[in-house]
Image (cartoon, helix red, strand yellow):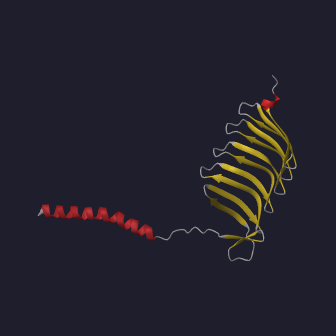
Amino acid sequence: MRYIASKYNKQILYFLLFMIPVMIILLLSTWPQKKIIRNAFEVRNSLTYNIGSETPYTGMVLDTITTKIIEYYLVDGLKQGNFIVYNFSGNVEVFGKMVNNKNEGEWKYFFPDGKIESVGNFENDKLTGKWVWYYSDGSLKKIGYFHKGQENGKWVEYKKSGEIKQETYFLNGKVVNSVKQEELKFS
């Protein structure tokens, strides 16, 4: 009799050990979950709206495009303030400011590992002033100047060793003169 009771208890124990996790899984799968609501936007006449709304959107936008996370703010449907692009590793790849949907002031671009790739300014959404580019090891790659979005003045490109590779002169986006370092050497 004791053998039958002990065999019966083992079967109940095995049944409970199997059924309790199954019941927990079933219960958790039907438990009310916090829903993540994503805003769906549309752009009309350069203003951003929630789809179906007649009021331009104000608030933070956090979105993904391919392998990038984009963060910016909208005020009355216009991009205003910081504009940041991150990679999925969490490193910033682009950082700048927006004013009325236009790039303004200093913008920085970074390699995926977080090292600086280039830095320069925008004015009214156009490249302006001095821009500097770097190799991934941090050494200087190129320095150039823009005026109203077009290359202007002297541009210098460097080898990784720091030697000048080439000098190019621009006027309103067109090359006026270009000299490679090898052409400057005298024999």
The residue nearer to you, when weighing 22 against 80, is 80
Where is residue 163? Give x, y as percent. Answer: 76, 30
Vertical position of residue 163 compared to residue 109: above or below: above
Identified at 16% across, 64% down, the residue is 5
Where is residue 92? Give x, y as percent. Answer: 67, 49
Where is residue 74? Give x, y as percent. Answer: 74, 64
The residue nearer to you, when weighing 183 against 22, is 183
In the rendered image, which quarter is residue 59 located in?
Answer: bottom right
Vertical position of residue 11 compared to residue 170: above or below: below
In the rendered image, which quarter is residue 21 located in?
Answer: bottom left
Where is residue 116? Give x, y as percent. Answer: 71, 43
Relative to residue 127, is residue 18 drawn left or right?
left
Q: Where does the C terminus fall, quadrant-wise?
A: top right
Report the residue that reaches farthest toward the left: 1
Q: Where does the N terminus fall, quadrant-wise?
A: bottom left
Vertical position of residue 6 compared to residue 43: above or below: above
